[in-house]
């Protein structure tokens, strides 16, 4: 079913998409209070550029590798390891 994006159909009334996506699919975007059409590929490219590279992220996280503690524990039978006093 072909849908003209100018037909005024509610999003909930649109047919379900199928995978895999090719990237040429049109998606609605609101830019400066105006709804416009953009390709899925253009959105993915924008979001990919917005993500921080590993080299940019490391200085922001601090030296967490040297600031953590590893603990080990063993379970016990509590009834044999406590004393009740009156």
Image: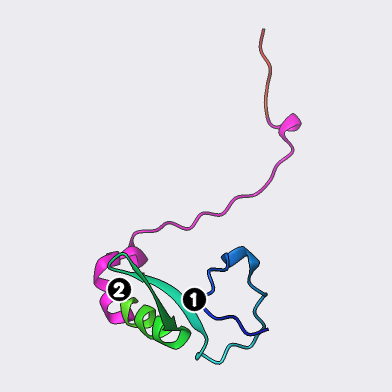
75 horizontally vs 34: left or right: right
Quarter of the image where the C terminus is located: top right
Q: Per the image, is 72 magenta?
A: yes
Mark 2 or mark 1, whichever is nearer to me: 1
31 horizontally vs 26: left or right: left
Q: How is the image coloured?
A: rainbow
Residue 83 % position (x, y)? 68, 21
What secondary structure is marked by label 2?
helix
x 34%, y 63%: residue: 64
Q: Report the residue marked by disc 1.
A: 6
The vertical placement of 79 against 62, above or below, is: above
Residue 60 % position (x, y)? 26, 67
What separation in Å lies between label 2 and label 1 (alpha carbons)?
42 Å
Q: Quadrant of residue 53?
A: bottom left
Q: Which mark is residue 60?
A: none
Q: Quadrant of residue 65?
A: bottom left
Highlighted range, magenta: 53-81
x 68%, y 46%: residue: 75
């Amino acid at each position: 079913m072909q849908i003209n994006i100018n037909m005024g159909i509610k999003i909930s009334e649109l047919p379900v998409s199928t995978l895999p996506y090719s990237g040429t699919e049109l998606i609605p975007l609101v830019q400066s209070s105006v709804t416009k059409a953009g390709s899925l590929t253009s959105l993915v490219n924008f979001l990919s550029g917005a993500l921080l590279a590993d080299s940019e992220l490391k200085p922001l996280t601090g030296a967490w590798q040297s600031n953590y503690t590893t603990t080990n524990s063993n379970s016990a039978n509590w009834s044999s390891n406590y004393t009740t006093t009156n």
